[in-house]
């Protein structure tokens, strides 16, 4: 038994779709998992912390190039913060390790705050009706 294949010159088109324009949809978030909130918060705040640490590093570098750090160390020596041996100096490693540690603590704290908000105020919870300023 032989089968025939029929080919047409024009592929079939949908005229209704071309006239209708772009399709519109409405996306509704029903539920947000706390684990997802924690992961996204940790990533977001860590990237934000890196931006701030890098900005502080650039500012510190510019202050060092312009001589502001030398002037500040001289000022601190004259008002009584002179070490027993040598001159007062800013220790970059000590400063930026503390900034990084404080930044990591901030990342964890604010991620936990976001997690707490996600657990206490679920997005898809409509059991109490809409939340309006008058209903709070």
Image (spheres, rainbow, N blue to C red):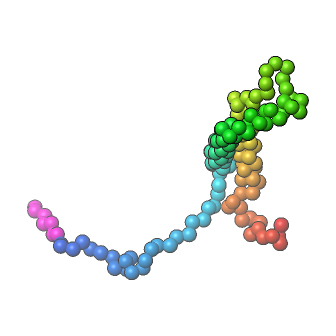
The answer to whether any part of residue 35 appears in the image is: no
Please tell me in which quadrant of the rendered image residue 100 appears: top right
Viewer-side residue, 95 vs 18: 95
Estimate the x, y position of residue 92 in percent, counting from the top left: 70, 31
Q: Which secondary structure is most common in the magenta stretch?
A: loop
Find the residue positioned furthest to the top.
85
Instruction: Classify residue 49 as left or right of residue 72.
Output: left
Q: In the figure, 43 relative to 28: above or below?
A: above
Viewer-side residue, 135 vs 47: 47
Please tell me whether residue 70 belongs to the stretch shown in magenta.
Answer: no
Instruction: Classify residue 51 as left or right of residue 120.
Output: left
The answer to whether any part of residue 115 appears in the image is: yes
Q: In the figure, 102 relative to 37: above or below?
A: above
Quadrant showing the N terminus? bottom left
Residue segment shown in magenta: 1-7
Identify which residue is drawn at 74% across, 36% down.
69
Please tell me whether residue 5 belongs to the stretch shown in magenta.
Answer: yes
Estimate the x, y position of residue 35 in percent, counting from the top left: 65, 46
Q: In the figure, 107 relative to 93: above or below?
A: below
Identify which residue is drawn at 30% across, 75% down.
13
Viewer-side residue, 102 vs 84: 84
Please tell me in which quadrant of the rendered image residue 102 appears: top right
Identify which residue is drawn at 13% across, 66% down.
4
Instruction: Classify residue 46 as left or right of residue 16.
Output: right
């Amino acid at each position: 038994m032989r089968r025939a294949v029929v080919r047409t010159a024009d592929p079939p088109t949908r005229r209704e779709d071309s006239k209708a324009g772009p399709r519109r949809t409405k996306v509704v978030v029903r539920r947000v998992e706390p684990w997802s909130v924690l992961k996204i918060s940790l990533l977001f705040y860590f990237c934000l912390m890196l931006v701030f640490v890098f900005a502080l590093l650039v500012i510190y570098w510019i202050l060092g190039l312009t001589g502001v750090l030398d002037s500040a160390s001289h000022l601190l020596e004259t008002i009584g913060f002179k070490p027993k041996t040598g001159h007062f100096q800013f220790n970059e490693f000590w400063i930026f390790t503390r900034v990084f540690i404080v930044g990591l603590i901030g990342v964890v704290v604010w991620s936990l705050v976001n997690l707490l908000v996600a657990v206490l105020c679920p997005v898809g919870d409509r059991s109490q009706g809409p939340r309006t300023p008058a209903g709070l």
